[in-house]
Amino acid sequence: MHPIENIMQTAMTEIKEMVDVNTIVGDAVVTPDGSTVIPISKVCFGFVAGGGEYSEGRPHDDEHQIPFAGGSGAGVSISPVGFLILGKQIELYTLNHKNTYEKIIESIPNLITEFAAVFKKDESELKQ
């Protein structure tokens, strides 16, 4: 087995241990009134691995092994999305917790469109 395969296999095994179905759909909690609350989360993860073999100008043959250099990395982000409440009715409560900066960034396309419309209106009035 090539060393990069070992690196990838180890990293993927670690990610599997960190993220399972209970991470996304949490453990159910029964409230005193008999309702069941199930937390729901969003899980994002990324993985990267790479490596290379460096010969230092020597030809590769069975006698002289080329040194291998490699590495891998992974990242996981878990964000709460909402709660599923099972009672007399089934309800989904979502969490919408955007901060001010995210709201500003999302509103930029609309602001640009509105400014463009105002300037076009001003130009058409000047031409008349």
Image (cartoon, rainbow, N blue to C red):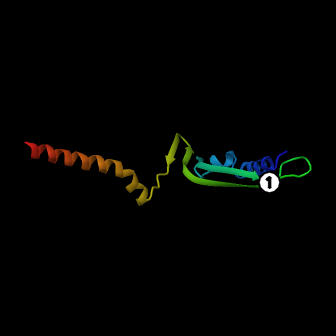
Q: Nearer the viewer, residue 111 or 6?
A: 6
The residue lying at 41 percent from left, 60 percent from top is 100
Can residue 14 be seen by looking at this rendering?
A: no
Q: Nearer the viewer, residue 80 or 32?
A: 80
User: Please, which residue is most extreme toward the top here?
Assistant: 89
Q: Which residue is mark 1?
A: 55
Q: Are there few (<14), some (14-19), or many (20+) residues within 10 Å of tag 1? A: few
Question: Image check: 84 left or right of 23?
Answer: left
Quadrant for the N terminus, please.
top right
Question: Image check: 23 left or right of 123?
Answer: right
Q: Nearer the viewer, residue 5 or 94?
A: 5
Residue 54, quarter of picture: bottom right
Question: Image check: 23 left or right of 128?
Answer: right
Q: Nearer the viewer, residue 4 or 89?
A: 4
Looking at the picture, how far across and down is residue 59, in whole percent?
Answer: 83, 49
What amino acid type should be assigned to the residue bearing mark 1?
Ser
| Labels in figure, total | 1
The residue lying at 56 percent from left, 52 percent from top is 80
The residue lying at 60 percent from left, 53 percent from top is 78
User: Please, which residue is most extreme toward the left here?
Assistant: 128
Looking at the picture, how far across and down is residue 75, in whole percent?
Answer: 64, 55
Element class at badge 1:
loop
Looking at the picture, how far across and down is residue 120, in whole percent?
Answer: 19, 45
Looking at the picture, how far across and down is residue 8, in whole percent?
Answer: 75, 48
